[in-house]
Image: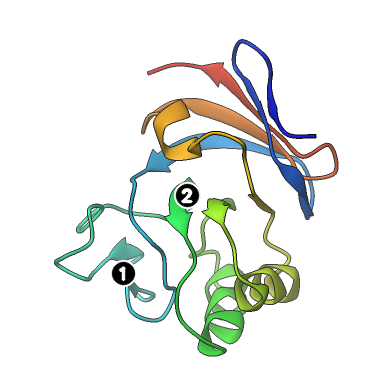
Amino acid sequence: MTGATKPGVLRGHVGIGQTVRGEALVAHDNFSARYDLDRLKGVFSRPQHKLFGHSYVNKILILNAAKGGVASAWMLKEMVSRNMGPKALILNFANPIMAQGAAYADLPLLDRFEFDVTGFVASGDIVEVDPAAGTLTIVAQD
Protein backbone atom coordinates (compact mmCIF):
# COMPACT_ATOMS: atom_id res chain seq x y z
CA MET A 1 0.00 0.00 0.00
CA THR A 2 1.27 3.48 -0.81
CA GLY A 3 0.60 6.89 0.63
CA ALA A 4 1.67 9.29 3.32
CA THR A 5 2.31 7.45 6.59
CA LYS A 6 2.88 10.52 8.80
CA PRO A 7 3.86 14.16 8.25
CA GLY A 8 7.17 14.32 6.43
CA VAL A 9 7.07 10.71 5.16
CA LEU A 10 5.93 9.56 1.74
CA ARG A 11 5.64 5.89 0.87
CA GLY A 12 6.36 4.53 -2.57
CA HIS A 13 7.11 1.14 -4.06
CA VAL A 14 10.01 -0.83 -2.56
CA GLY A 15 13.06 0.43 -4.42
CA ILE A 16 16.68 -0.33 -5.23
CA GLY A 17 19.85 0.40 -3.26
CA GLN A 18 21.04 1.57 0.13
CA THR A 19 19.56 4.20 2.43
CA VAL A 20 20.96 7.67 1.70
CA ARG A 21 20.43 11.18 3.05
CA GLY A 22 21.07 14.43 1.24
CA GLU A 23 19.84 17.63 -0.33
CA ALA A 24 16.92 17.38 -2.71
CA LEU A 25 16.89 18.88 -6.20
CA VAL A 26 13.28 18.90 -7.40
CA ALA A 27 11.34 19.69 -10.58
CA HIS A 28 8.12 18.44 -12.11
CA ASP A 29 9.95 17.47 -15.28
CA ASN A 30 11.02 14.20 -16.83
CA PHE A 31 14.53 12.74 -16.68
CA SER A 32 16.98 11.34 -19.20
CA ALA A 33 20.60 10.74 -18.22
CA ARG A 34 21.52 10.98 -21.90
CA TYR A 35 19.68 14.09 -23.05
CA ASP A 36 19.32 16.23 -19.92
CA LEU A 37 22.79 16.11 -18.34
CA ASP A 38 26.30 17.33 -19.01
CA ARG A 39 28.05 14.37 -17.40
CA LEU A 40 31.45 16.10 -17.41
CA LYS A 41 30.35 19.35 -15.77
CA GLY A 42 27.72 17.76 -13.50
CA VAL A 43 24.83 20.05 -14.49
CA PHE A 44 21.51 19.84 -16.27
CA SER A 45 22.37 20.96 -19.79
CA ARG A 46 19.15 20.81 -21.84
CA PRO A 47 17.88 24.41 -21.98
CA GLN A 48 14.23 23.29 -21.92
CA HIS A 49 14.67 21.35 -18.66
CA LYS A 50 13.33 23.05 -15.54
CA LEU A 51 16.65 22.37 -13.76
CA PHE A 52 18.83 23.78 -16.55
CA GLY A 53 22.16 24.96 -15.15
CA HIS A 54 21.70 23.29 -11.74
CA SER A 55 24.28 20.82 -10.47
CA TYR A 56 22.93 17.33 -9.82
CA VAL A 57 26.17 16.00 -8.27
CA ASN A 58 25.57 14.47 -4.82
CA LYS A 59 21.93 15.63 -4.87
CA ILE A 60 18.87 13.49 -4.44
CA LEU A 61 17.09 14.07 -7.75
CA ILE A 62 13.32 14.19 -7.47
CA LEU A 63 11.61 14.29 -10.85
CA ASN A 64 8.46 13.14 -12.60
CA ALA A 65 9.23 10.28 -14.97
CA ALA A 66 12.11 8.46 -16.61
CA LYS A 67 12.57 8.88 -20.33
CA GLY A 68 15.11 7.61 -22.77
CA GLY A 69 16.64 4.29 -23.61
CA VAL A 70 19.40 1.84 -22.87
CA ALA A 71 22.18 4.44 -22.80
CA SER A 72 20.93 5.54 -19.37
CA ALA A 73 22.39 2.44 -17.71
CA TRP A 74 25.99 2.95 -18.74
CA MET A 75 25.74 6.74 -18.34
CA LEU A 76 24.57 6.44 -14.75
CA LYS A 77 27.30 3.89 -14.01
CA GLU A 78 29.96 6.11 -15.58
CA MET A 79 28.85 9.20 -13.62
CA VAL A 80 28.76 7.34 -10.31
CA SER A 81 32.19 5.77 -10.95
CA ARG A 82 33.67 9.29 -11.33
CA ASN A 83 31.85 10.66 -8.24
CA MET A 84 29.85 12.91 -10.58
CA GLY A 85 26.46 11.30 -10.07
CA PRO A 86 23.42 12.05 -7.97
CA LYS A 87 23.02 10.37 -4.57
CA ALA A 88 19.65 8.90 -5.53
CA LEU A 89 16.87 9.06 -8.10
CA ILE A 90 13.32 9.60 -6.90
CA LEU A 91 10.69 9.48 -9.64
CA ASN A 92 6.95 9.36 -9.81
CA PHE A 93 7.41 6.80 -12.60
CA ALA A 94 10.60 4.89 -13.39
CA ASN A 95 10.74 2.66 -16.45
CA PRO A 96 12.48 -0.74 -16.50
CA ILE A 97 15.53 0.75 -18.23
CA MET A 98 15.98 3.38 -15.51
CA ALA A 99 15.59 0.71 -12.81
CA GLN A 100 18.18 -1.45 -14.54
CA GLY A 101 20.51 1.55 -14.89
CA ALA A 102 20.15 2.47 -11.22
CA ALA A 103 20.87 -1.11 -10.15
CA TYR A 104 23.89 -1.29 -12.48
CA ALA A 105 25.23 2.01 -11.13
CA ASP A 106 24.48 1.08 -7.50
CA LEU A 107 22.32 4.20 -7.33
CA PRO A 108 19.33 4.21 -4.96
CA LEU A 109 15.99 4.49 -6.79
CA LEU A 110 12.47 4.90 -5.47
CA ASP A 111 9.25 5.44 -7.44
CA ARG A 112 5.48 4.87 -7.67
CA PHE A 113 4.17 7.17 -4.96
CA GLU A 114 0.46 7.70 -4.35
CA PHE A 115 1.03 11.45 -4.45
CA ASP A 116 3.16 13.52 -6.82
CA VAL A 117 6.54 13.41 -5.08
CA THR A 118 7.62 16.60 -6.88
CA GLY A 119 4.91 18.49 -4.98
CA PHE A 120 5.81 16.91 -1.64
CA VAL A 121 9.48 17.93 -1.45
CA ALA A 122 11.17 21.24 -2.32
CA SER A 123 14.68 21.83 -3.64
CA GLY A 124 17.00 22.37 -0.70
CA ASP A 125 15.09 20.09 1.67
CA ILE A 126 17.19 17.42 3.35
CA VAL A 127 15.63 14.02 2.72
CA GLU A 128 16.34 10.43 3.61
CA VAL A 129 15.61 7.73 1.06
CA ASP A 130 15.10 4.18 2.34
CA PRO A 131 14.52 2.01 -0.74
CA ALA A 132 14.06 -1.21 1.27
CA ALA A 133 11.19 0.38 3.21
CA GLY A 134 9.93 2.29 0.16
CA THR A 135 10.00 5.61 2.04
CA LEU A 136 11.19 9.13 1.49
CA THR A 137 11.40 11.24 4.66
CA ILE A 138 11.83 14.99 4.86
CA VAL A 139 14.45 15.44 7.59
CA ALA A 140 14.74 19.24 7.34
CA GLN A 141 13.01 21.81 5.17
CA ASP A 142 14.84 24.61 3.40
Instruction: Look at the image and name its color scheme.
Output: rainbow
Q: Where is residue 95 in the image (x, y as percent from the top left)?
A: 60, 70
Number of on-image labels: 2
Quick check: 73 left or right of 126?
Answer: right
Q: Residue 41 carries which label?
A: 1
Q: What element carries label 2?
A: strand
Distance (Cα) linking label 1 and label 2: 16 Å
Would residue 59 be visible to someone looking at this image?
no
Image spot of residue 136 (x, y percent): 65, 32
Which residue is farthest left?
Answer: 47
Establish if 130 lies above or below 56. Answer: above
In this rendered view, identify the residue nearer to me: 6 or 71. Answer: 6
Q: In this view, does 95 lie to the left or right of 66?
A: right
User: Which residue is disc 2 drawn over?
Assistant: 61
Q: Looking at this view, name the residue that lies furthest to the right.
A: 132
Residue 30 falls left or right of residue 88: left
Placement of 122 over or under 29, stated as above or below: above
Q: Which amino acid does label 2 sit on?
A: Leu
Category of crowding for the residue at label 2, using alpha-carbon neighbours closer than 10 angstroms: few (below 14), some (14–19), many (at least 20): many
Q: How crowded is mark 1: few (under 14 residues within 10 Å), some or many (20 or more)?
A: few
Residue 20 visible in the picture: yes
